[in-house]
Image (cartoon, rainbow, N blue to C red):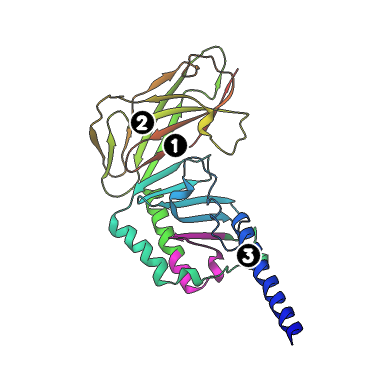
Amino acid sequence: MDTWKNKYYSWISVILVSLLVLSIQSCERPGVFNHTEPEPVTSIPEVNSDEVIIHLKIKGGPEGFDHDLFVLNNRVLMIYDNYPDNGSLNKVLTQIEMNDLRSLFSENNFFSLQNELAASDAGKNILYEVTFKQDDLVHTIIADYNTASVRARIIIDALLLHFTNLRSSLKIELITDKTEITTARFLRLVMKVENQSDSELELVYTQGRAVDYVVYQINDNQFNTLEPDNELWRWSLNFSVNPVEKRLKIAAHQFTEFEEITWNVQTDEKTMVKGWVAVVGELVSTPGGRSPTIPIKIN
């Protein structure tokens, strides 16, 4: 009998020691008994993944779409059109709009939705990838709209409406006098902002931060990102030490052009630039965004 008890207690001791070792290892190994941070929802440098609560990626189809919509914690909505080629737009949602979006995911039980995608769909149809973060919960689904469930379609439709409304209301265009710099060591830049909607558009900005012109170093005219570390030169319109809020109204289907400026093909540190650069115009207002990127070759 004593022998049986000794074996029993020995067996219990082994289990307890094993559990202790496992609990210690779980603290050192991600994914075992501990919370692991989700992967970043985007690699676009100017989007802080930690602040993103909603992400819609529109990808694929015959035209090769690669569009993104982000909603951040601070109610900023951002859309990107084939980043970094075709620029971006942003606006601030009202608190009601933000509440409606949160309710949208809750009412349609987003966390219970699964991928609604057949293997044959890949590369053929437009796919919608939706990510929603709530507290410590993160969930992503990928769906083909044609075969998606009603709940998934309701969510996609609501996000697409925000995407389309912003994209169709504001157009930001950067105009340059050349795309290759040879003997004339300068580049003229001017920003054009067009109100494409049927109603008046008001831009709210801080004096000194209405328009920025930015030049990035790139390896050649084929590039897939614009990193802050590669910024060579930046010019801000009407820079002011004591900024004041300004409002600029643009009538329906009208446009405005900001002051033309000249870049002398130097960095902010007055070093001459050679090779390939990417030039971007930034409308630093609400709503605002960035112009499509223009590659410039400097001989």
Residue occupying image coordinates x 28% and y 59%: 96
Above or below, 23 against 203 in this view is below
Picture disc at residue 20:
3
Q: Position of residue 286 (x, y in %)?
A: 32, 42
Q: Could you classify mark 1 by the number of other residues whose Cα lies within 10 Å: few (under 14), some (14-19), or many (20 or more)?
A: many
Q: Tell me how far mark 1 sits from mark 3, CA to CA.
A: 57 Å
Picture disc at residue 211:
2
Quarter of the picture containing the C terminus is top right
Q: Which residues are magenta?
A: 127-155
Q: Position of residue 155 (x, y in %)?
A: 44, 65
Specify whether residue 205 is painted magenta.
no
Q: Could you classify mark 2 by the number of other residues whose Cα lies within 10 Å: few (under 14), some (14-19), or many (20 or more)?
A: many
Of mark 1 and mark 3, the one earlier in the sequence is: 3
Specify whether residue 143 is painted magenta.
yes
Q: Tell me how far mark 2 sits from mark 1, CA to CA.
A: 11 Å
Between residue 8 and residue 26, name the one nearer to us.
8
Tags 3 and 2 touching, CB below 8 Å: no
Residue located beneath label 1 in the image: 291
Between residue 281 and residue 206, name the one nearer to us.
206
Quarter of the picture containing the N terminus is bottom right
SS for dot 2:
strand
Above or below, 91 against 205 in this view is below
Q: Tell me how far mark 3 sits from mark 2, CA to CA.
A: 60 Å
Q: Position of residue 147 (x, y in %)?
A: 56, 71
Q: Is residue 213 left or right of residue 11?
A: left
Of mark 3 and mark 2, the one earlier in the sequence is: 3
Of mark 2 and mark 1, the one earlier in the sequence is: 2
Q: Could you classify mark 3 by the number of other residues whose Cα lies within 10 Å: few (under 14), some (14-19), or many (20 or more)?
A: few
Residue occupying image coordinates x 54% and y 50%: 40
Q: Amino acid at mark 2?
A: Val
Q: Amino acid at mark 3?
A: Leu
